[in-house]
Amino acid sequence: MNSLTASYIIDLLSRADSAWEDDRCDDAVDFYRQAFLVDASIKRAAYRLGWCYNQQQRYAEAAWTLKTAVQLDPSDETILAELAFAFRSMGRFDEAVEAYADLLRINPHSVEARYNIGWIDNQRGDYREAIKVLEDAARIAPDRGDVYEDLGYAYKNTGRAVDAVKAYYLHSNDLHSPMNGNVAAFATLNDRAAARQMNGRRSAAAGRASTDCRASASRSKPKRSGGGDEEGPEDTHRVAGGGVP
């Protein structure tokens, strides 16, 4: 690469990074795409371009770009999670599960990969498979309401009504018990005692949150630390950790 080309790429990346940090995704896409076309080995450009494509719901372009980023660094959890999100959003569930499985090979304790695989199993109607992976996720992260929400949905669809009620109302961060004094709905004394503790909390309708709600909640932009190193997106629905330098 000659000095003129290098200078051109540096200028493009500077403009792209500025647009990225100012939440101007349309401008960021233009600059990162130009840089990516000149040099496809720049991981930052490939990842951020793919992230912005996802933000714009251009999922096919996101997947193509992020696959290049994965080739540049197959061990980056953040990129794998973003690629899996693109596949999931297009309904290409086999490829999404494959990406989440790759993430699990890198980080066997990833709650995000397990949650999303379980979510996909529920979408497919594979409720028993969903239960297996979501129970694992719940053991690792017992405070994750979204995990319990999908676990409750899988329980409900396999006829495990009591387990579904417990998952929805005793564990979910967002679904508090509307039953108040109706403790007879719970099977055991421990369940009833837990139900009493829930009394007075805000009521919420039981059920599974919609795909759109959960997808929109996960569009949290990665932030940069004070030292300039990029951190992974804060929202844990999509990213298990790591960052893209």
Image: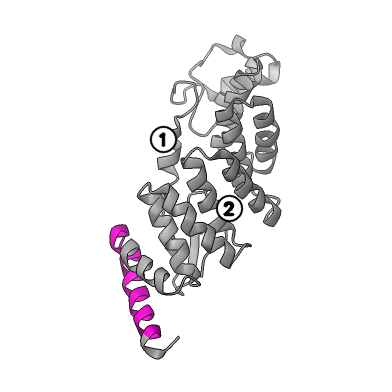
Question: Horizontally, is 64 left or right of 122 in the view?
Answer: left
- Choose between 137 and 27: the one closer to the eye: 27
89 falls in the magenta region: no
**The magenta stretch spans which residues?**
5-27
In the rendering, at what x and y percent does residue 153 appear?
Answer: 57, 24
Q: Taking the image as drawn, is residue 233 in sight?
A: no
Residue denoted by label 2: 240
Q: Is residue 177 above or below residue 225?
A: above
Q: What's the residue at 50%, 69% (across, down)?
A: 43
Please tell me how crowded label 2 is: few (under 14), some (14-19), or many (20+) other residues with Cα within 10 Å: many
**Looking at the image, which residue is at 60% across and 49% down?**
99
Q: Answer yes or no: do the residues labelled 1 and 2 have beta carbons within 8 Å?
A: no
- Say which element carries label 1: helix
Badge 1 or badge 2: first in the primary sequence: 1
Q: Amino acid at mark 2?
A: Ala
Image height of 68 relative to 170, above or below: below
Residue 19, percent from left and from top? 31, 66
Amino acid type shown at disc 1: Cys
189 sits left or right of 24 in the view: right
Where in the figure is residue 22, as x and y percent of width and height? 30, 63
Residue that numbered label 1 is attached to: 213
Residue, x 66% and y 40% (percent of image)? 137
Image quadrant assignment for residue 49: bottom left
